[in-house]
Image (cartoon, grey):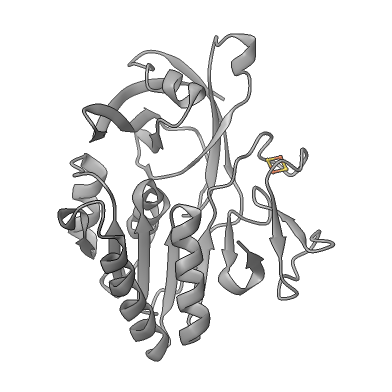
Amino acid sequence: TTLTVLDNVPFGTVSGENLFFALRIERPEWADWQPGQFVMLRPVGWALDMIWARPFSICRVSKRDLVIFFQVVGRGTKRLAELKAGDKVVVWGPLGTPFVMEEKTPTLLLAGGIGIAPLIAYAQKHPQPWNLHMEFGHRMPLNCYPFESINERITAASHYERGPDDLAHFLDLVETSVKEYAESDGLVLACGPTPFLKAVQTFAATHNARCQLSLENRMACGVGACLGCVTRTTDKMTAKGVAAGRAQACEHGPVFWADQIIL
Ligand code: FES
């Protein structure tokens, strides 16, 4: 579907450079979507070397708009940062396997950096948001409309004040929370950079927590055809179509149970 960009707002700066953006586009005509799913997105009219679309977690869907977050990490995302109101993008989705949602289960949301996007979606869609708590570690102060909206719905502790070098402190807090939720038979959901997910995976194994991780793999086709997003799996992974210890993050994920994958 070709859709119009409504705005593209920078909301996080590192060393004076805008690195984080909230891209708001008109709402696609989807019947439904689930938190943890993603879209593939490509601006219209890019040069041939930019034909590859990129995957983005759905962050918010309202009656009027769809919001995704992205971080400028290379040539493609640098070009995305130039998108402005009125530009056209091609979007397809919603794609992938979403997070499980258990209305009455106390659920801990663990967000590392831009990995907060699908967890905002989760908080938005959850029918009993008072059962949610979020721990959020990130490098920059964030002030953007989606963050305001999650604070209205759930309790969220955010840790940027302690500075970028305080990862160890943040991970200590995360482990304490994972342990607590494991003891009360809660659910733990995490999204963020791989080293962060690895740490959460270890805590979940140590404390025997029910835990799902959303991977931020590179993707090309988004629909299980190119094998560009393969993830190694354990023998706990029994989903249809998974063979030889390999799963496609775009199709069988991006959300996996923590004990099903090898990071
Ligand atoms: Fe092509 Fe997953 S992105 S198989």
Q: Residue furthest right?
A: 244
Residue 98 coordinates in the image, percent (x, y): 54, 57
- Reply above or below: 127 against 96: below
Count of numbered marks: 0
Residue at image coords 33%, 55%: 124
Residue at image coords 36%, 13%: 86
The one nearer the camera, 154 or 236, is 236
- Reply above or below: 23 against 100: above
Q: Quadrant of ligand 1?
A: top right
Residue 18 coordinates in the image, percent (x, y): 27, 28
The quadrant in which the C terminus is found is bottom right
- Reply above or below: 58 against 210: above
Q: Residue furthest front?
A: 165
- Left or right: 256, with 135 as reference point: right
- Reply above or below: 50 against 196: above
Residue 227 visible in the current orientation: yes
Residue 226 coordinates in the image, percent (x, y): 77, 38
Residue 99 visible in the current orientation: no
Residue at image coords 44%, 76%: 187
Residue 138 coordinates in the image, percent (x, y): 29, 51
Q: Residue furthest left?
A: 161
The quadrant in which the N terminus is found is top right
Residue at image coords 75%, 71%: 238
- Left or right: 87, with 93 as reference point: left
Q: Give residue 245's quadrant in the image.
A: bottom right
